[in-house]
Image (tube, rainbow, N blue to C red):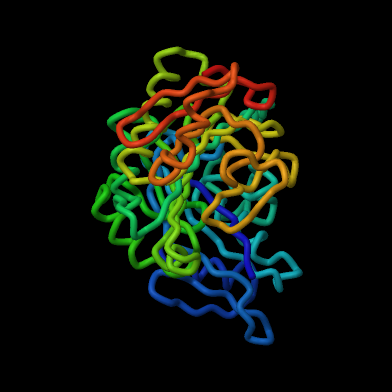
Amino acid sequence: MSYSVEVFGVDPPGVAVVERLVRESTGLDTRVDGGVVEAFGPDEGLLFEVGEPVSVDAEEWPLGARFPDGEVFRVVLEVELVDVDGKGEAFARVLAGAMSGVVMDETGLSWPGPAAKRYQKAMAAAEPVVEVPAHQLMMWWGGFWDEGHAPLPELVGQFGRWCPEAMPRRYGEYWPYKHRFSDGGVDAMSAWWRQSEESSTVAYECVGLPFSTGYLAVPCAIRSVGGVWWMTLFSAADVIVDEELRARQRALFTGVADLSGAVYAFAEVDEGYFWNGTRIGCHGGDGEWHSSVCAFSGRKHPEAGLMGLTWYPTWWSWFGGKYRGLLADWLSRPRKAWTVSPTESGVLCSCRTSRSRSVS
């Protein structure tokens, strides 16, 4: 198992430079595999590997980092857990010095240490990262693969019809996402999605506020759960105060549900998250999380009142497929706090409750 450490800087190193720096600064043996430099310990076990530099936009810089005008590059180090002496993290600081940059790991932003001074050309000025408490809005869509659907990446490609801010900027299996959406658009994302086998989902980060990230089930995962597909989209709920943005987000929610041939979709607002200026997140288990109780999952809950669907209140619930008929009587007599509206191929139920913490 491994974890990632990122280095951002303005001077991209070549493979030969990285290999030389690893040998000089750590004394480890190296091997080059394509553009990746691997570092091995005395027992010939892999300790860490250094990827190739990738050009990144300003939106992808670690929050608080500042660089001179010009192109900025990111190098990802995959550090094995067996690297108990921390040689991988120490080398990340050496590399940051060589790249005139900074190191970013799960603890935050850091600078090259004294041992990297002889490789260092310049240091960027930094500002502290500010995290503010926030609510997370999660949209979830799901249905059966054999009952009419659109390929999931093509659905994501339709986000621009309703909310261009929700369009993908980068995507991949693990963060940092290595594929840039602008390089091939929906076609490239669809091709990569179809052949993905290493993870149950493809993740993507969004273009801008208030949207943050999303996930798409990949074909191998869809097959493993009996042909059930799903996709999600996350945003910072506290930012959605503008009526025009709220209307567009609602149009996105119902538009994707109608276009996808979904059976069920919901949008919920949860506490315990933070917003750091670029993304929504939580620390450990601080964020609320409710597992979906869906009829096609075979799970039941004693409080389930809508044919085995979510037993907790949500901001929006959308019903399509056979659920429209099954819930027709109930939807024709909605509760006082609920508003029911037909959509192109389903029914939207908006709910004002203490848990939804929002308005319909």
Is residue 286 found left or right of 118 in the rendered image?
right
Query: Going 51% across and 57% down the picture, which residue do you hit?
Result: 174
Nearer the observer, 16 or 262? 262
How many discs appear?
0
> In this image, 285 relative to 307: left or right?
right
**75 or 317: nearer the eye?**
317
What residue is at 69 percent from the left and 69 percent from the top?
81
Residue at the top extreme of this rendering: 243
Q: Position of residue 133 (x, y in %)?
A: 69, 26
Q: In the rendered view, would you say 128 is above or below 304?
A: above
Image quadrant where one finds the N terminus: bottom right
Q: Residue at x 56, y 57 (%)?
A: 297
- Which residue is painted at 50% across and 20% down in the image? 339
User: Looking at this view, is 357 or 9 the one in front?
Assistant: 357
In the image: residue 258, left or right of residue 293: left
Residue 64 makes an appearance in the image: no
Quadrant in which residue 252 is drawn:
top left
Quadrant of the image occupied by residue 45: bottom right
**335 relative to 273, above or below:** above
Q: Is residue 292 above or below residue 146?
A: above
Measured as percent of width and height from the top left, residue 10 is found at: 44, 45
* Residue 240 in the image, given as x and y percentages of width and height: 51, 20
Query: Is residue 176 depicted above or below 38 in this figure?
Result: above
Spot the residue most to the front.
329
- Answer with the quarter of the image where residue 53 lies: bottom left
Q: Position of residue 140 (x, y in %)?
A: 49, 42
Task: Note whether residue 14 is visible.
Answer: yes
